[in-house]
Amino acid sequence: MMHTGDSLAAELQRVREHRPVRERPGADAAPPVLSLFVIDVSGDAAAYVERLRSVLVPAVRMGCTADFEQESLPVDEVPGWFAAVGSGSGSGDEERAPQFARAGREAYAEHTGGGRPWDLQDWLYRFDRDEHSRGWEWWDATVTGPSRVHVRVDSWGEPVFGCQDLLWAVFTAGAVRVEGPTVQITSFRENP
């Protein structure tokens, strides 16, 4: 997927939007199809959405502003729990990460058939606009039940796309189970 300065700025705006959690953006702004992830979470679904956004906001913002020619990117705005749960943090803080993040790391490994934890810098470099392996752009997240969230991303209608980086964030923010992605025709008139 090609990411541009304009598309990253629009994505950042969508990630930062704090609409009521059951309210979705209007159909007139959406692409014709979006990819849906159905996520069962540990604990409160609205709190989960905020944790997920807290990870994605600084990453997408870096995509807009960071110099990806640097050897490492600044991590000041990345939540400490997210930095601690990944590999290569070198801080030894993995066990100090909150339980939801540690359980999410294990659920990610199970979901991906043994996938290893992401190194924070590797994960952040996926948001470089010249990096084409990130096959998605954030669209929205809606709470559809006490422990269920729907996350929609624009994958340009592709049924298979690079989303391991998204799954890492989704699981470590507190997901216990993820279904999808499934490509769906955009219809915001229906109930989620």
Image: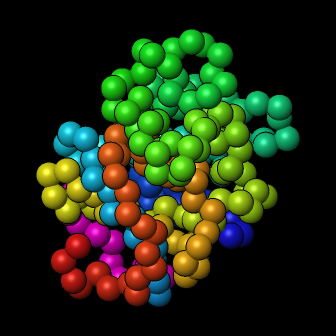
Q: Is residue 50 visible?
A: no
Residue 109 at x, y percent in the picture? 51, 42
Magenta-drawn stretch, dominant element (helix, strand or loop): loop
Q: Is residue 183 visible?
A: yes
Identity of the residue drawn at 46% across and 36% down: 105
Residue 41 at x, y percent in the picture? 27, 47
How many numbered discs, if any? 0
Q: Is residue 83 left or right of residue 189?
A: right
Name the image colouring: rainbow
Q: Is residue 25 magenta?
A: yes
**Looking at the image, residue 98 lies above or below residue 34:** above
Please state the extent of the stretch shown in magenta in the rendering: 20-31
Identity of the residue drawn at 60% across and 38% down: 116
Identity of the residue drawn at 58% across and 36% down: 117
Identity of the residue drawn at 63% across and 22% down: 89
Q: Is residue 57 left or right of residue 118?
A: left
